[in-house]
Image (cartoon, coloured by chain):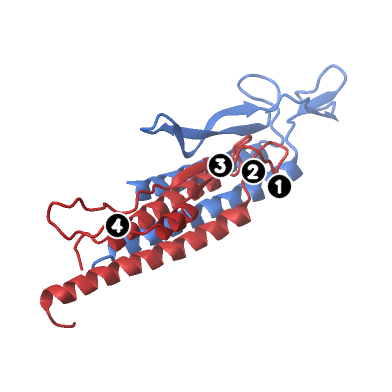
Chain colours: A blue, B red
Amino acid sequence: MKMFQSLAISGSGMTAQRMWLDLISNNIANVNTTRTREGGPYQRQAPVFAQRLEQVLQGGYQGAGVQVSRITRDQSPPRLQHEPEHPDADANGFVSYPNVELNKEFVNMITASRAYEANAAAFESAKQMALRALEIGR
Amino acid sequence: MRFESPTLLALQKALDAGSLRQRVIANNIANINTPGFKKSSVEFQILFETALNRPLPLAKTDPRHLSARGVGLEPRVITHNNTSIRADGNNVDIEEEMISQAANMLAYQTTAQLVSGKYASLERVIRGRSG
């Protein structure tokens, strides 16, 4: 049923973009977090999108949507601020703050929500087409 | 008028191509943020037009004649590997995809309308009256 596959593909796109939005929200929420379970400041997280493929009869592969294959941690150096009174300050009085840049997060947030909207529009037109097909013969 | 008319078969193929195209467009849009993704498209219109230019069905003047089953054409999915519009190698152009999607939906609805019309005229013939 190709029509339902279209719906599933758009659904996978919406899931992936929402996952990205979740990570962005998490990055923004942790913009000042200096303590994590692994120790050290929070590191910016980003998704790695990978296309999902499906084997078809003719021996080839056909696109079947998208998935977040893994979540990466940004290894770039932390933001150092001189705050000697902070309990997490190092010997020189510098505190390592997360490498989250708010402007970058906001730009990504717009990209992710626009991509989400595009997937929602594709979903909507697949639905319209399926409904139209149901009307054949009425 | 025949039940399995070549027109109906051709329309059916066109509907199949329409839903395949929707699937391919949905996949392109789903992968709008996937690095290195290359878009695909469905080639059908051109094939369809060439097929239509050929003399269509075989005439069946004897029951032993073989019938021509539709127009032998299948929609093809083509991947565009040679272009990139972004630094990450992705080549999905969102405007182009949204336009193809709108065009595809209209074409699909038109085809569905034609199929409905075809069945409506069959029904008219069967009932022997209009309406």
Q: Nearer the viewer, residue B85 or B13?
A: B13
* Residue A90, position as x, y percentages in the image: 81, 19
Camera-near label (3 vs 2) is 2
Q: Is residue B59 above or below residue A65?
A: below
Q: Secondary structure at mark 3?
A: loop
Q: Which chain is disc 4 placed on?
A: B
Q: Which chain is disc 1 placed on?
A: A
Q: Which residue position is annotated with label 1?
A: A107
Q: Residue furthest front?
A: B61
Give the alpha-carbon distance from disc 4 to disc 1, as whole Å: 49 Å
Q: Secondary structure at mark 2?
A: loop
* Residue at horizontal 20 percent and vertical 68 percent from the top: B1
Q: Is residue B84 above or below residue B46?
A: above
Tell which circle, 2 or 4, labels the residue nearer the N-terminal end: 4
Q: Residues within 10 Å of mark 4 (few under 14, many from 20)?
A: some
Q: Secondary structure at mark 1?
A: helix
Q: Quadrant of residue A130?
A: bottom left
* Residue at horizontal 13 percent and vertical 51 percent from the top: B64
